[in-house]
Image (tube, rainbow, N blue to C red):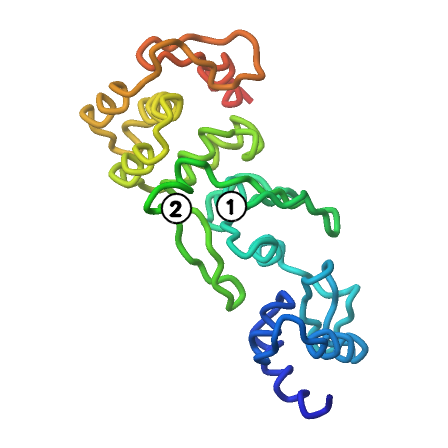
């Protein structure tokens, strides 16, 4: 095992959090090999490796212990699925637009993964929308961002804007969502148009149209773009928040908006 010490130290230097498969790949070990487990056990005893859960580990720096090491929740979320894409409020935070601090982290994956909790932080998987999975560009609107020397996949700001407008509950509700999106300095409407065309959901055209109409000056939204969104609105009125009774019907968008959102009641405080 000592012959692997130098090699594992190089690996740990660049892998603050890692899966057992990444370790196997690094040492060129077959899937059925016990050697990866032996390396993990040896280095755990040496105080170099801590356990997040089965198959997922983190690096303990010299002078720290498993209990005192801070595990970056963004990196952890990015390792909970092979195809994880950080999304919703987690994406807003990583992109620098989050308004409030959250203890829930969200990521997309093609396959469902059970909710996970570690150190009072909750991690939740959201399935990639079916129309997006079946499209020619299932990773549309994503980008790679460096975090502590590690590249993680995250939804870009235009896709994140659409996604959180679709599911405000994954952004802490309407107020948090509005305050976060409003921090964006600019948006590319062409990317929004392309993403909406891939998703093909009329309620998305409506809620995006309503929001951008409210913020047309801030984001320099042209009338032609709003008319394009309006053309694809639902035939019948739909609730933006299906869990909420009542609301205000916005005829242009056939969208029933919560009264607190239409009046932006949080600005009164």
Q: Quadrant of residue 106?
A: top right
Q: Tell me if residue 114 comes above or below residue 36 in the rendering.
A: above
* Displayed quadrant of residue 206: top left
Q: Residue at x 57, y 39 (%)?
A: 100
Question: Seen in the image, is 195 located left or right of residue 261?
Answer: left
Q: Secondary structure at mark 1?
A: loop
Q: Quadrant of the C terminus?
A: top right
Relative depth, front residue between 177 and 45: 45
Residue linked to disc 1: 110
Mark 1 residue crowding within 10 angstroms, few (<14) / some (14–19) / many (20+): some
**Residue depicted at x 39% and y 41%:** 134
Q: Which mark is residue 138?
A: 2
With 67 as the anchor, is 150 left or right in this view? left
Q: Regarding mark 2 in the picture, which secondary structure is present there?
A: loop
> Would you say the residues marked 1 and 2 are in contact, meaning their CB atoms lie under 8 Å apart?
yes
- Compared with 238, 269 (above or below) is below
Q: Residue at x 35, y 42 (%)?
A: 135
| Gap between marks 1 and 2 measured at Cα | 10 Å
Q: Position of residue 32 (x, y in %)?
A: 67, 72
Residue at 67 percent of width and 43 percent of height = 115
Give coordinates of residue 84: x percent, y percent: 53, 52
Rate crowding at label 2 as few (under 14), some (14 to 19) or many (20 or more) other CA atoms within 10 Å.
some
Q: Quadrant of the N terminus?
A: bottom right
């Amino acid at each position: 095992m000592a012959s692997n010490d130098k090699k594992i130290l190089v690996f740990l230097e660049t892998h603050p959090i890692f899966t057992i498969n990444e370790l196997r790949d690094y040492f060129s070990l077959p899937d059925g090999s016990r050697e990866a487990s032996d390396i993990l056990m040896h280095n755990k005893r040496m105080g170099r490796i801590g356990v997040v859960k089965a198959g997922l580990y983190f690096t303990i720096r010299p002078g720290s212990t498993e209990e005192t090491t801070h595990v970056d929740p963004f990196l952890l979320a990015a390792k909970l699925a092979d195809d994880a894409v950080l999304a919703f409020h987690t994406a807003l935070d990583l992109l620098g637009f989050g308004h409030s601090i959250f203890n829930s982290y969200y990521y997309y994956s093609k396959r469902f993964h059970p909710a996970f909790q570690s150190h009072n932080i909750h991690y939740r998987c959201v399935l990639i929308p079916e129309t997006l999975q079946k499209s020619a560009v299932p990773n549309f609107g994503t980008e790679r961002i460096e975090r502590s020397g590690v590249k993680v996949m995250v939804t870009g700001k235009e896709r994140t804007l659409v996604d959180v407008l679709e599911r405000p509950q994954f952004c802490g509700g309407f107020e948090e969502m509005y305050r976060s999106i409003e921090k964006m300095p600019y948006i590319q409407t062409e990317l929004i148009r392309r993403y909406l065309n891939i998703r093909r959901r009329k309620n998305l055209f409506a809620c995006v149209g309503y929001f951008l109409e409210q913020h047309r000056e801030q984001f320099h939204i042209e009338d032609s773009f709003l008319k394009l969104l309006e053309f694809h609105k639902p035939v019948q009125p739909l609730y933006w928040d299906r869990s909420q009774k009542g609301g205000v019907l916005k005829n242009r968008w056939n969208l029933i908006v919560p009264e607190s959102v239409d009046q932006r009641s949080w600005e009164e405080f």
